Amino acid sequence: MDESTEPPSAAASDVPVIRFDDLHKSFGKQHVLAGLNLDVERGKTLAIMGASGSGKSVTLRHIIGLMKPDSGRVLVEGVEVAKMTREQLSEMRKGMGYVFQDGALINWLSIGENVALPLRENTNLSDKEIRERAQHKLELVHVPDAWNKMPSEISGGMRKRIGIARALITDPDIILYDEPNAGLDPEIARSINATIRHLADTLEVTSIVVEHRIECIRVVADEVLFLHEGKSLIQTATADFFASQHPRLLRFFGQDSLPPSANPHS
Ligand SMILES: Nc1ncnc2c1ncn2[C@@H]1O[C@H](COP(=O)(O)OP(=O)(O)OP(=O)(O)O)[C@@H](O)[C@H]1O
Ligand SMILES: [Mg+2]
């Protein structure tokens, strides 16, 4: 059989769950992504770091098909997102959780109903079952009493946690987190990070985590990619990333001025 006519295989285990292949995306004259390549293997967590405005959120939006590339491809389970039919896209999104940077809650729905919404829209579960599942996710992110509150009544950190609860509600195989620690105090952040790690370790969830906080990345990430000038400057194991002496990374982390004793030229 001619291989080129075979339908794309969704479950081949050697295919990366998420792959970017030479992706370009511009807004007007601004070339935000300029040849981005990345791979995330099944059950792994990739952290994406990079300066503010370097294109991290734009990268995530391509994965759920909210943005289309100018050129290059995004493949999820080996299937090109931009070529998916409406049904394929909707099916893919059901298996994906997305934690938006700002929480993206619906203002006229209570917190509980915000979390329950994906189940109400996509399943035939009973009201009782949906409420139980949503309440369980609220407990997981440490806001057990939030059900009846409205989005306008809660703090930024709480919005973030509700966004995480909603992303987890359908028990997705792929989760994209856009700054899961933003606005959280250190204790809650640690607990959210432990939850992210737990999902990867126990349920083989494949994730991308966009985050600046090093404590988060050390706990959750198997690999780190640094986005620079629209490309991957480096994608490597987390320990190797933090040991890297690349001048751009040293500058990013504020370690570019070595103490005199370590500087051979002084
Ligand atoms: N829909 C859009 N239209 C025009 N420009 C956009 C759009 N979305 C993003 N951009 C631009 O693309 C660049 C990258 O944006 P992006 O939101 O991906 O940055 P980021 O790396 O997530 O930054 P931050 O760390 O601040 O969240 C920015 O300059 C932004 O203004
Ligand atoms: Mg962003």
Image (tube, rainbow, N blue to C red):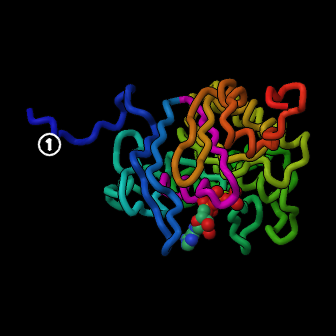
Q: Residue at x 49, y 75 (%)?
A: 28
Q: Secondary structure at mark 1?
A: helix
Report whether residue 130 is seen. no
Task: Determine crowd level at label 1: few under 14, some 14-19, many 20+ residues with C-alpha closer than 10 A.
Answer: few
Report if residue 123 lies within the magenta region: no
Report the quarter where the C terminus lies. Answer: top right
Q: Which residue is mark 1?
A: 5
Mark 1 and ligand 1: say if the CB distance to the nearest ligand atom is below 8 Å. Answer: no
Residue 136, given in percent of the width and then of the height, sits at 75, 43
Report the quarter where the N terminus lies. Answer: top left
Q: Is residue 218 left or right of residue 203?
A: right
Q: Nearer the viewer, residue 16 or 103?
A: 16
Report whether residue 241 is seen. yes
Q: Nearer the viewer, residue 169 or 84?
A: 84
Bounds of the magenta segment = 43-64
Q: Is residue 48 left or right of residue 140?
A: left
Name the residue type under label 1.
Thr
